[in-house]
Every structure is written in C-alpha cells, then in structure tokens.
Amino acid sequence: MKKAPTRLEREHMSKVASLGCLVCQRPANVHHIRPVGLGIGMRSGHYQTIPLCYDHHQGQFSIHNCKEQFEAMYGTEEELLHRTLKEIKNIEQVNNFFNLKGENNG
Ligand SMILES: [Zn+2]
Ligand SMILES: [Zn+2]
C-alpha cells in the first residue's frame, strides 16, 4: 500500500521535481530512493526523493533498469539525495531573503 503524501510532503516533492533532472536538467518526476536497510518493495519516505527525467528514471539506462551502471556514472542514490536537498535549501534561502525584503515594504 502506498502511503499518501501529506501537504508538506507534496510541496517538497514539487520542489524536487522543479529542480529538473539531476543528470540532464530536463523536466523531471520524482524518484523515491530505497535506502539500505529497507526491505525489497519498501518505499522510503516522500522526503527521500530525487528529480529524474523519464529517460534517467525509467528509460533503458535508468536508475530503475540499470541501477549499478547509473550509480557508477552519476553517484549513488544517497549522494544524489544529498545534492537534491542541498539545492532545495539554497533556493529556500534565496526565497526567504526576498520574502523578508517584501515584508519591510509593507
Ligand atoms: Zn535526465
Ligand atoms: Zn523511481
């Protein structure tokens, strides 16, 4: 059974997708990474998601179909997750900066 994401999780995932594919920057969907320690078929939380385009997500040489080669070329799921979260944090810092400025005007 898939657990439905909460509102915050949905917002987080739309931020992840909006980053674009980690490999080629094309429009992306989110991929749920599978951290070591979870059983086969277990999904990690909706915060453990990374953006990948169709080709890199489910295409012939994608993280789903060629995981070993994919991780050898682009990094492990955990590394890609750290990169994703860092990029989102950078964007949020910029947004907060502009929000603060807006409040002063108003
Ligand atoms: Zn891609
Ligand atoms: Zn996936």
Image (tube, helix red, strand yellow):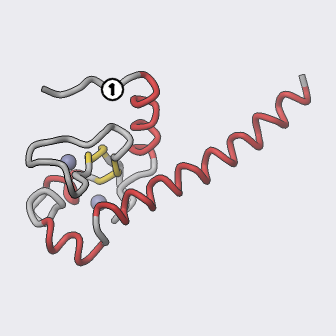
Q: Which quarter shows the N terminus?
A: top left
In the picture, measured across the screen, residue 51 lies left or right of residue 87, that is: left
Residue with the mark numbered 1: 5
**Looking at the image, residue 95 lies above or below residue 19:** above
Q: Position of residue 68 (x, y in %)?
A: 14, 71
Residue 24, picture quadrant: bottom left
Residue 98, picture quadrant: top right
Which residue: 40% across, 29% down?
10
In the picture, measured across the screen, residue 25 lies left or right of residue 94, that is: left
Q: Which of 67 and 40 is in front in this view?
A: 40
* Residue furthest out toward the right: 105
Which residue: 36% across, 62% down?
80
Q: Position of residue 64 (x, y in %)?
A: 13, 56
The residue under label 1 is which amino acid type? Pro
In the picture, measured across the screen, residue 58 lies left or right of residue 9, that is: left
Tag count: 1
Q: Which of 73 and 34 is in front in this view?
A: 34
Q: Where is residue 40 in the image (x, y as percent from the top left)?
A: 8, 48
* Residue furthest out toward the bottom: 72
